[in-house]
Structure formats: structure tokens, C-alpha cells
Amino acid sequence: MEKFTAHTGVAMPLKRSNVDTDQIIPAVYLKRVTRSGFEDGLFGAWRNDPDFVLNRPEYAGASVLVAGPDFGTGSSREHAVWALQNYGFKAVISSRFADIFRGNSGKSGLVAAQVGEKVVQRIWDHLDEFPGATVTVDLESRTVRAGEGPDAIEDSFDIDDYTRYRLLEGLDDIGITMSHGDDIEAYESTRPSWKPVTQRL
Amino acid sequence: MGRTLAEKVWDEHVVRSAPGEPDLLYIDLHLIHEVTSPQAFDGLRLAGRQVRRPDLTLATEDHNVPTLDWDKPIADPVSKTQVDTLRRNAAEFGVRLHPLGDIEQGIVHVVGPQLGLTQPGMTIVCGDSHTSTHGAFGAIAFGIGTSEVEHVLATQTLMQAKPRTMAVTINGSLPAGVTAKDMVLTLITHTGTGGGQGYIVEYRGRAIDELSMEGRMTVCNMSIEWGAKAGLIAPDQTTFDYIEGKPEAPKGADWDAAVAHWKTLVTDADAEYDQEIVLDASTMTPFVTWGTNPGQGVPLGGVVPTPADFEEESDRIAAENALTYMGLEAGTPMRDVHVDTVFVGSCTNGRIEDLRLAAEIIEGHKVADGTRLLVVPGSVRVRLQAMEEGLDKIFTEAGAEWRGAGCSMCLGMNPDQLAVGERSASTSNRNFEGRQGKGGRTHLVSIPVAAATAVRGTLSSPADLVSVEV
């Protein structure tokens, strides 16, 4: 996984709450067997609308998504994270993320930055005033920043310590866990014999 | 201080715990299907890794299998690629697979319990958010993403921060005709879709104790719809009776040892939850959704709400968007809403008890003109059991379509989809925009409401059928 320290990019406001993973990527787009190529399905149903924010020229090349509360609810499909990443998003800012989406983001290297609801509103206001403006998501200092001068926005965001550490270092989870192979073997030796198995090996 | 049920099950599965790191949790059962696994197996292959415990792994095909002509090659080439990929991966990595056409094939969350693989006190994961279904047995069961699927395949463990605990206590008894589905839809409207975030929820109280295992599975299934990490119910005699004799259930001395352990899986009297919600089942009524998330619901006897009545601005906007999408006017009685398609099935309501209840209500009636009823059993076993009991004849004589097993119209990955503007009453779990087909409009309902709606063509309960000519 690539290391993530800080990212500055064009920010796209998505002024909706409860953006579920069926909206991020509808099920009909889930049939690929690779991790790439999902960008065409991103916000699949909404994209037909020429006024949908993703279609507006000022947000071309957006890489930071600023969304309403309860982003990523619903299905466990990691394709939602891949679709955002395949499109070019590096970070999502919201006041609340669904647990599975947050977990999937951390595993795939998309930063899910949780901020206060007022901070989202301030960034939205800023983007209304300056469409196409950039926002910085700084994982090192755990801050989001936008604008300049006296009206500049700078606030901290929440992300759990371990996910932050892994993203900063670009570490592979499976590799870390396999280094604890002895612990896993020791645990397995204590499992009761009546626990079910799917096949006798 | 005592521990809650969730804490006991969690603690039993901690392989490694270190300050500042999530716990490393052992996984007793890993369920797999064709949609969220291909990239995980690919990851293993690229890294030269094996499946650590093929004997704790089970695969089935469910999400995009057709429910008609399942004995022929899958027509959609992209669905076929995904199913073929699962078959290749299962063969290469030695994973037990129940493919289309196999007698044990079906929705992964129906198959686990019916095989007896789902047992109390286990940790169960699957790349599917409705894995919470298995919590009905007193297991910690939750959905994971594909990176985590790969992690479990390679290590049989997961790194997980310990969630907080919540009790949902449902006192009283459900009135006649009100089901587990109405109970959980009522709860989700009470909490909102994010109310359970960060919690493992334990459902308890008299109304929960009185539910069958099927009903408990319906409740736990929808835990994710209000954001909970997992939902579980303490195992009791109802649980043990359900498991005993299932193909993979413990036998003989193993059974006695297992039950002795399972009986310890209750929350201690002096344990404390981080949060508690208390509801009264005796006041619950048939409940339906009007909007585009499962928290947007009202009693069937109610009306489509007025967006301006919502206190929070975000709820107001969400309601306005939902009414536009759903093509509904505020103030319309829910019973006046005409339905084009009724879907009976899914991991929420596709088990034998659900089909029996639907058949009982529909027997002697006809599906209304202008409405179609799709009955999709949750598994091949459920299908065969229903046919043995003659339920299929009741459905087909009423004019319903009797289909093969799978996820079907719950998420429309196979050909069973709503058309643009088509309205459904669905016993499934999500009414998201486009979930059942692009532009489709979904009302989540219980089995009795689905069956009565099919007969009347408008959202109805069995009580409304009295006036219908037989």
C-alpha cells in the first residue's frame, strides 16, 4: 500500500446525508473480478443528471470528497472504496461514516476523515464561494485545511490511531498479522474439538 | 464486574492483544460468495499465500445467480465470469463450495444456519453486511470488506477494535399478526440509520425470547440497517432445539459439551452495557417504509409524512428527496399506495417459516390484477421443503411466480429487477434508491403485509383481506 502523509486537491461537495454504498456504486457495477475499472459506476444513478456535482467542470479532477453525515452506510462492498479511488479520490471528509465503509477505506488506503458537522458546513460554504478550491487532508497532523487569510478553515479530524499509523507507513495488514503466526497457532491448539468444521482435511 | 454476552464471546476469541493496537480476533467460520471474494483470492495468489483453514471456510453462489433456468449456463456473461471465478478459486484453494444446482446452494446466511454450521459463541464473518443474521444464535457475526476477506483467508483472524455494547430490550409480547420484521423496522425508525454505529447490540426481553429462530434471524439480519457492528441474542432452548440434528451440529458427547458451554453465554446480572434502548412490543403494529432508507418508516395505518415536520434539517432534506424519488405525496395513507411487484424472499425473510406464513395468508386468494408476486426461497433446501408441504402450489394457484433460490430482487444483481418507476413491497432489507433496479421504488414490509398486499394490490395487512371476495 502507498504511504499517505498529506494530500491537497480539488474538493467536491456532496450535500446529501445517508449516501449508502448502493449510491456510491450500484450493484450492477459489482461484477468485475478486479480492483480497478469501477470509476464508471461511481454514483452511477446520479451521474445521468448533467447538473450532478461530479459532472460540473469546476470539479473535474476532484480528489477530496466532502459529504454529509452517515456516509457509506449499507452494503459491505469494498467496491465503493475502489470506485472512489479509481476515480481519483484520495480522501473523504464527513461528520459520520458507517463502520464497514470506514474499515474498508483504511484497508485500501482511502483516508476517511471524520470532522464535526459544522466543519463540513464551513467547507461547503467555502466551496460554494470558491468552486474548484482545494482542501488539504493532513494525516500527519490530523487536520483538514481550506482557504487562506482570516477566513481560513483549519480543524482536526478523527481517525483511529492504528489506521493512521498503517496509512502513514503504508503497511500491509496481512504481513503484520502473519508475523504473529505463533500466537495464532497457540490459540488454535486451545479450540474445543466440538467446534464445527466445513470439511475434514 | 460481570460481562455481557458480546464481551464473553469476544474475549474467547482474542488471539493477541496489545496496547494501542486492535485485538487480533480468531474467526470460527468464514462464509464466501461470488461478489466480494474474487479480488481477495487474487491477492492471495499474487502474494503466494494459501487459505489457512479451508476447513473453517464455506462458499456458495447467491448474489447474482438466476432464479429461472438455473440448470442452463448463466446468460449474463459478467455474472457468469464472477461465478466461474468463484468455482476456480474454490477448486484451487480447496474450499468447500455449493454451486448453483447443488442441493445445499442458497443465500449464504440461510445456508450456514440450516447446515448447523452457525452455532452459539462463534465468530462468523462474510463479505456481506447481512452476516449479522447469524447473531441470532448468540454468535458475533459481522460483514467485512474484500481486504478483510483476504486477511481472514490468509490468517483465519481479523484485526478489530473492540466495539462498545448496547442492549435493546423489547418488553411485552408482539400482538397477533405483528412480526419480527415489524419489530425491527419500528426499532430502526426509532434509532435512525446511524443509531447503532460502533456497537455490538444484544437484543433481549420477553418479545425476543418469544421469537422463533427464524424471527430472531430477521431481527439480527437488519442490525446493520441501523449501523450496528453486529446484533446478537443469547442462546436458549429455542436455539438448541433448532441446531440439534442439523448436519454439522455436534453429536453425542460433543453435543453435551457444546450445550454446557452455550448455556454460559448469557449476560451476567451485574454486567453493564454502554447504552440501552427499551421498547414495548405490545404497542407495535404492521410497519412499512415510505422513503429511501430503512429508518424512514411508519405504521401501515399511518400516512406519508410531511418533510416540514422533521426537526433536523438533514432529515427534512432527506425526506424531500425520498418523496420525490418514491413518487409519493405527503399525507397519502400508506394503505392507498398501489404496488406493482411483491417480493417474498431474501436473507431477511426467505426461510421456510416465512414461506409458510405467506402461503397461509394467500391460500384461497388470487394475486391482484396489475400486481405480480415473486416468491424466491432462500435456499434449495427451503425450496424443496416448501414443495414437500405443497406451498409452491398455493403460490402458483394464486398466480405467483415460484422461483429458484438466491438473493434475487433484494439487490437486483441477477435478472430479477424492478423497472424505472416500478413500485415494490419487499420483504428484503434495503429500500435504497435503485437497490432493486434502477429507478425502482421499494417499500420494506413484513411477510403478512407482503402477502396481503399481493392480494389487494395496495399496501395491506391480512386484516384487510376480510372484505376481499374469495
Image (cartoon, coloured by chain):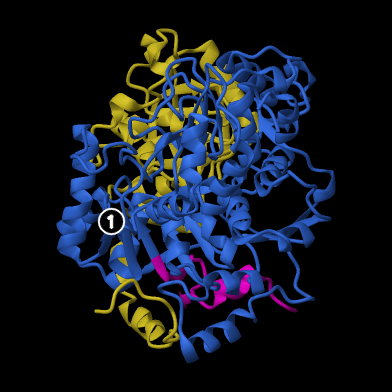
Chain colours: A yellow, B blue
Q: Quadrant of residue A33?
A: top left
Q: Residue at x 31, y 36 (%)?
A: B68
- Residue under label 1, please give it: B102
Whether residue B446 can be seen here = no
Answer with left or right where residue B44 lies relative to residue A99: left
Residue positioned most to the top: A50
* Place of residue B79 in the rendered image (x, y in percent of width and height, measured from the top left): 24, 37
* Place of residue B213 in the rendered image (x, y in percent of width and height, measured from the top left): 60, 61
Please, what is the three-letter code of the amino acid marked with disc 1?
Asp
Whether residue B8 can be seen here = yes
Pinpoint the chain carrying mark 1. B
* Place of residue A85 in the rendered image (x, y in percent of width and height, measured from the top left): 33, 35
Answer with left or right where residue B188 lies relative to residue A26: right
* Local crowd size for mark 1, using a 10 Å CA cut-off: few (<14), some (14–19), many (≥20): few
Q: Residue at x 58, y 36 (%)?
A: A70
Q: Quadrant of the N terminus of chain B?
A: bottom right
B292 w.r.t. B404: above or below: above
Q: Quadrant of the C terminus of chain B?
A: top right
- Span colored in magenta: B1-29
Q: Is residue B24 magenta?
A: yes
Q: Quadrant of residue B64?
A: top left
In this figure, what is the number of numbered marks? 1
Q: Is residue A8 magenta?
A: no
Q: Residue at x 58, y 28 (%)?
A: B454
